[in-house]
Image (tube, rainbow, N blue to C red):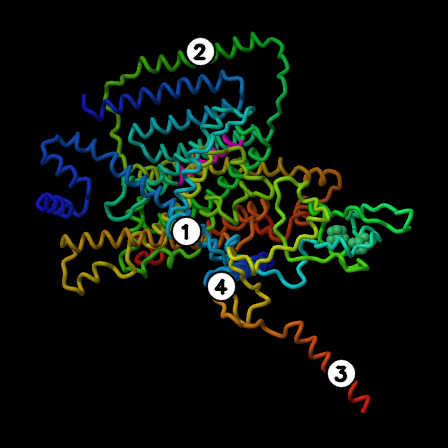
C-alpha cells in the first residue's frame, strides 16, 4: 500500500464516518439550529468525498450550492423564526415514528440490495480530473440541454412563486379593489426599480 | 558552502523556477525516495503562504492606521517601533494575552467554532493565489471557482457566531453578514465568469498568462472595465469594508457578530477580515491587473537587452519582479480600499440590497452577454 | 418600450454621476493626505487657550457681598453661598462659598452678573478627578490661581490656529515673535480710543 492510497483510505473513513454520524445527528438532535449546522458539515464532507473521487469541480459546486446557498438559507429561515416554544404533543406520535422508521429501513434495505448486487470489481469510468469542467459544460449544452433548460424554467417558476407570496399585499389589494396588479406594482414601486417596469 | 549554494541555484533555475521539482532533485541527490521528498515538500509552500499572509495582515493593519491618520490629518501610531511599525504586533500580542471570555448564556461550542469557520476558508483560498508562473501552492484546475466556493462557507461561520453569542446585536449582525455575502456573491461570480470566458480557463495562472501577452495593454481591466468595477464593489462588500460594513455597523449594532467576542477569538475575526481584504485585492490584481506581469513584457526587455529569457539570472530577476509587481498592485488596491473607507458613508441595508440585486446583478449579466458577443466577434482581442 | 429606454438612460446617467461624485470624494480624501497633521502631543504639548476661554471659575472671597445674584442667574442654581445675618451689625457675614464643577456647565452667567466682579473665568481646563466630589471646589480651592500653560516648564505651549500668522497651519515651528493674522483686540481698542479723542478734539475746535 503506497502513501497516497493509505491517505485516501484514511480520508475516506473519516469523511464517511462524519457523514453517517452527522446525518444521524441532523435527524436525532432536538435543537434545530444544531441540526442545520450539522447538515452543513455533512454537505462539506460529501464535497470531500467528491474531491477524493478526483471531481474537484463537482466538489466546489457542492460547497457553493449546498453549503453556501441551501444551508445558509435554511439557517436564515430558522433564525428569523427562532421561536422558543414547547412543541405540542402530537397524537399517535409512536405510530408515526414507527411508520417513518419503516420507510427509512426500507430505503436502507434497498441501498444494501443495490450494494450487494452491483459488481463493484469492474473498473468504473476513469476520472478525468481537470478537464471535467469542460466536459460538464459540453454535456450540459448538448445531450442534457433539455433537462438543463427545464430545471432553469422550474427555478424561474419557483422564483415567481416566491415573489407572489412575498408581495401578497399587492395581490390582495387587487382582490379587494379589482384594480389590475400591473397598475399597483407601478404605483407602489419606487422610482429606481428598473427591472419590473420593463414591460409597460 | 558556496558550491552547495551554487548547486541549489542551478537546480532551482534549470527547472524553469519550479521550486518543487528542484527541491525533489535536491533531496533525491541526498538519497531520499521521491515520494518522501514530495511529502516533505508539501507543507513548505503552505507554511510560506501562511506566514506571507500573516505578515501581509500586519502590514495592512499598519498601513490602514497610518493612511487613516494621514487622511484625517493625524499622526497615527508612533511610539511602537519606528513610525509605529510594531503597532500591529503590539495589538496582536495584546489580543493574545487577553482573557478569552465566553458569555455564560452563550452556546460555547458554536461560539468557539464560529470564528474558526470564518478564518479557515479565507486561508484555504490562498491555495490558488499565484505570485509567479510556478509560485503558488497548487495550480488547481478549478482555480478561481474554488475561491468563490470557499468564500461561500464564511457566512455559515458568521451566522454561527451570531447565533451562539445569544445577543440580539450579534444575531442581527450575523444575519446581515449572511444576507450581504449571499447577494454579492452572484454579481461577483458573474464578473469572474466574464474573465474566465476570455481566458478559457478557471486556473489563475492561465488567467494571468492570457493577460501578459502585450504587457500593460493586454490587462483585463481594459477589456473588462465594468467587470472590474463590479468585482471591486462586490469584493468590498464580501470583506465587509466600508461603505458595506453593515454587519458590524457600530452605531446600530455595537459590533455586529463580534460583539461578545474578546481575546484570541476576536483576533480570529480580525485576522479573517484583513486576510480577506488582502486576498480580494490579490485576486483583483490577478483577474484584472495582470497578476505578476510587468507593464512592459519581460520578454521584450530581455530581447532589447540581447539576453535570452531563459538565462538563470534573468529568470530569477523576472520572478522577483513578478512577486514585487503582485504585491505592489495588491497594496495599491488595499490603499484604494482604505481611501474609500474614509470617503464613503455607510449605505443602508435596503440601499445595499438594492445595489446588489437591482444594479450589480443586471449590469453583470449584461457585461457577461457583451463579453460573449465580443468574444464571438473579435476572437483575437477577447480570447478565441 | 420607449419609456423603458428613457428610464434606462436616466438610470445610467444617475449611475455615472454617482461615480463622478465618488471620484470627487476620493480626490478630497487623497488631498487631505498630503496635509500636515495638526496633532498636538498632549500632555507634552498644550494649546494656549484663547483670552475669553471659559475654564474653571476663580473666586475672590474678600470681594464677595453674598448677594446671591450668581445663584439666581445660574441655570442650575449651582453656587452655594453660605452666609449668616449678623444681628448686631445687620450685615450678611459670608462663611463659605462653593461651586461644584462636576455640575457646572461653564456658561459664565455668574461671572457676567456678579456685581463686585469677584468671579472670573480662568484658562484652566484639566479638571479630571478620581472622585466626582473632588470637583466640588470650596472658596479656598476657588481662590487658587489657575495653572498656566505658558509658564509650565514641562509643557511646550502651542498657539491655537486663530493665533497663527496668515497661511501658517502648524504651530510647531513658529518664529518667536510672529504675530497673528489681523489685529489684536488691544490694537483695535487703542485705535478706536485714538479716533474718539481725535473726534472730540475736532468738536472742541
Ligand atoms: S454674585 Fe458675586 S458678590 Fe454676589 S454672592 Fe455671587 S459671588 Fe458673591
Ligand atoms: S458658570 Fe454657569 S453653571 Fe457654572 S456656576 Fe456659573 S452660572 Fe452656574
Camera-near label (2 vs 4) is 4
Residue under pointer 4: C172
Q: In which quarter of the image is residue A125?
A: top left
Q: In this view, does C56 lie to the left or right of B27?
A: right
Residues in magenta, as a range: B148-162
Q: Position of residue B297 (x, y in %)?
A: 25, 59
- Visible in this render: residue B368? no
| Chain designation of label 3 | C
Residue under pointer 2: A105
Q: In this view, does B252 lie to the left or right of B110?
A: right
Please determine if labels 3 and 4 lie on a single subunit: yes
Residue under pointer 3: C197
Camera-near label (2 vs 3) is 3
Work out whether mark 3 precedes mark 4 in sequence or the reverse, and give the earlier one.
4
Residue under pointer 1: B63
Camera-near label (3 vs 4) is 3
Q: Position of residue B249 (x, y in %)?
A: 56, 43
Q: What element carries label 2?
A: helix
Q: Is mark 4 on a helix, strand or loop?
A: loop
Neighbour tally class for label 2: few under 14, some 14-19, many 20 plus, Cα within 10 Å? few
Q: Where is residue B227 in the image (x, y as percent from the top left)?
A: 42, 53
Please determine if labels 2 and 3 lie on a single subunit: no
- Visible in this render: residue A93? yes
Give the CA distance from mark 3 to mark 4. 41 Å
Up-down: is B5 above or below C160? above
Q: Is mark 3 on a helix, strand or loop?
A: helix
Q: Does the magenta stretch include residue B161?
A: yes
Q: Where is residue B150 in the image (x, y as percent from the top left)?
A: 39, 37
Mark 4 vs ligand 2: CB below 8 Å? no
Neighbour tally class for label 4: few under 14, some 14-19, many 20 plus, Cα within 10 Å? some
Q: Does the magenta stretch include residue A6?
A: no
Amino acid at each position: 500500500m503506497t502513501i497516497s492510497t493509505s491517505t485516501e483510505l484514511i480520508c475516506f473513513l473519516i469523511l464517511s464516518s462524519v457523514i453517517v454520524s452527522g446525518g444521524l445527528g441532523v435527524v436525532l438532535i432536538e435543537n434545530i439550529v444544531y441540526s442545520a449546522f450539522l447538515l452543513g458539515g455533512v454537505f462539506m464532507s460529501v464535497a470531500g468525498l467528491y474531491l477524493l473521487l478526483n471531481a474537484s469541480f463537482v466538489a466546489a459546486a457542492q460547497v457553493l450550492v449546498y453549503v453556501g446557498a441551501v444551508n445558509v438559507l435554511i439557517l436564515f429561515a430558522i433564525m428569523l423564526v427562532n421561536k422558543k416554544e414547547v412543541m405540542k404533543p402530537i397524537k399517535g406520535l409512536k405510530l408515526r415514528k414507527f411508520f417513518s422508521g419503516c420507510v427509512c429501513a426500507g430505503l436502507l434495505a434497498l441501498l444494501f440490495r443495490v450494494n450487494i448486487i452491483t459488481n463493484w470489481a469492474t473498473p468504473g469510468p476513469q476520472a478525468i480530473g481537470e478537464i471535467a469542467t469542460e466536459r460538464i459544460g459540453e454535456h450540459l449544452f448538448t445531450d442534457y440541454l433539455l433537462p438543463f433548460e427545464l430545471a432553469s424554467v422550474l427555478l424561474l417558476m419557483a422564483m415567481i412563486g416566491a415573489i407572489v407570496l412575498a408581495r401578497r399585499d399587492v395581490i390582495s389589494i387587487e382582490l379587494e379593489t379589482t384594480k389590475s396588479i400591473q397598475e399597483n406594482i407601478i404605483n407602489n414601486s419606487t422610482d429606481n426599480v428598473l427591472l419590473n417596469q420593463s414591460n409597460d | 558552502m558556496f558550491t552547495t549554494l551554487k548547486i541549489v541555484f542551478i537546480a532551482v533555475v534549470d527547472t524553469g523556477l519550479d521550486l518543487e521539482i528542484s527541491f525533489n532533485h535536491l533531496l533525491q541527490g541526498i538519497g531520499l525516495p521521491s515520494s518522501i521528498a514530495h511529502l516533505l515538500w508539501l507543507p513548505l509552500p503552505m507554511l510560506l503562504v501562511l506566514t506571507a499572509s500573516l505578515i501581509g495582515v500586519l502590514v495592512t493593519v499598519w498601513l490602514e492606521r497610518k493612511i487613516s491618520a494621514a487622511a484625517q490629518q493625524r499622526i497615527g501610531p508612533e511610539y511602537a517601533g519606528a513610525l509605529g511599525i510594531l503597532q500591529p504586533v503590539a495589538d496582536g500580542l495584546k489580543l493574545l494575552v487577553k482573557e478569552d471570555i465566553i458569555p455564560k448564556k452563550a452556546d460555547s461550542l458554536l461560539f468557539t467554532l464560529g470564528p474558526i469557520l470564518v478564518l479557515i476558508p479565507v486561508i484555504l483560498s490562498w491555495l490558488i493565489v499565484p505570485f509567479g508562473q510556478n509560485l503558488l501552492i497548487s495550480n488547481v484546475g478549478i482555480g478561481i471557482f474554488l475561491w468563490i466556493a470557499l468564500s461561500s462557507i464564511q457566512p455559515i461561520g458568521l451566522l454561527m457566531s451570531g447565533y451562539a453569542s445569544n445577543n440580539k446585536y450579534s444575531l442581527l449582525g450575523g444575519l446581515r453578514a449572511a444576507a450581504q455575502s449571499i447577494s454579492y456573491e452572484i454579481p461577483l461570480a458573474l464578473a469572474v465568469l466574464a474573465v474566465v470566458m476570455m481566458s478559457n480557463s478557471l486556473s489563475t495562472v492561465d488567467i494571468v498568462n492570457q493577460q501578459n501577452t502585450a504587457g500593460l495593454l493586454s490587462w483585463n481591466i481594459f477589456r473588462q472595465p465594468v467587470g472590474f468595477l463590479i468585482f471591486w464593489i462586490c469584493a468590498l462588500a464580501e470583506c465587509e469594508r466600508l461603505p458595506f460594513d453593515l454587519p458590524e455597523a457600530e452605531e446600530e449594532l455595537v459590533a455586529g457578530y463580534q460583539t461578545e467576542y474578546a481575546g484570541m477569538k476576536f483576533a480570529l475575526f480580525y485576522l479573517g477580515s484583513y486576510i480577506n481584504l488582502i486576498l480580494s485585492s490579490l485576486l483583483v490584481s490577478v483577474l484584472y491587473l495582470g497578476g505578476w506581469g510587468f507593464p512592459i513584457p519581460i520578454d521584450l526587455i530581455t530581447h532589447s537587452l540581447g539576453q535570452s529569457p531563459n538565462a538563470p539570472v534573468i529568470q530569477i530577476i523576472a520572478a522577483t519582479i513578478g512577486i514585487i509587481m503582485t504585491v505592489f498592485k495588491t497594496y495599491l488596491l488595499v490603499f484604494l480600499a482604505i481611501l474609500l473607507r474614509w470617503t464613503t458613508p455607510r449605505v443602508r441595508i435596503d440601499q445595499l440590497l438594492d445595489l446588489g440585486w437591482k444594479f450589480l446583478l443586471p449590469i453583470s449579466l449584461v457585461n457577461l452577454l457583451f463579453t460573449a458577443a465580443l468574444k464571438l466577434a473579435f476572437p483575437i482581442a477577447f480570447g478565441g | 418600450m420607449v419609456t423603458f429606454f428613457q428610464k434606462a438612460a436616466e438610470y445610467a446617467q444617475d449611475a455615472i454621476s454617482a461615480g463622478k461624485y465618488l471620484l470627487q470624494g476620493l480626490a478630497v480624501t487623497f488631498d487631505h493626505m498630503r496635509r500636515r497633521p495638526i496633532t498636538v502631543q498632549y500632555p507634552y504639548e498644550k494649546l494656549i487657550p484663547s483670552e475669553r476661554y471659559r475654564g474653571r471659575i476663580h473666586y475672590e472671597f474678600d470681594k464677595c457681598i453674598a448677594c446671591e445674584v450668581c445663584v439666581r442667574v445660574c441655570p442650575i442654581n449651582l453656587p452655594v453661598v453660605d452666609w449668616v445675618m449678623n444681628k448686631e451689625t445687620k450685615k450678611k457675614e459670608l462663611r463659605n462659598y462653593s461651586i461644584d464643577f462636576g455640575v457646572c456647565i461653564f456658561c459664565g452667567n455668574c461671572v457676567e452678573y456678579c456685581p463686585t466682579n469677584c468671579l472670573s473665568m480662568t484658562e484652566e481646563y484639566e479638571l479630571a478627578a478620581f472622585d466626582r466630589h473632588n470637583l466640588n471646589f470650596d472658596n479656598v480651592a476657588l481662590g487658587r490661581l489657575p495653572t498656566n500653560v505658558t509658564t509650565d516648564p514641562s509643557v511646550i505651549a502651542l498657539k491655537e490656529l486663530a493665533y497663527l500668522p496668515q497661511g501658517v497651519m502648524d504651530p510647531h515651528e513658529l518664529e518667536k515673535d510672529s504675530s497673528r493674522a489681523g489685529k489684536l483686540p488691544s490694537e483695535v481698542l487703542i485705535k478706536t480710543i485714538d479716533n474718539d479723542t481725535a473726534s472730540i478734539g475736532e468738536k472742541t475746535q
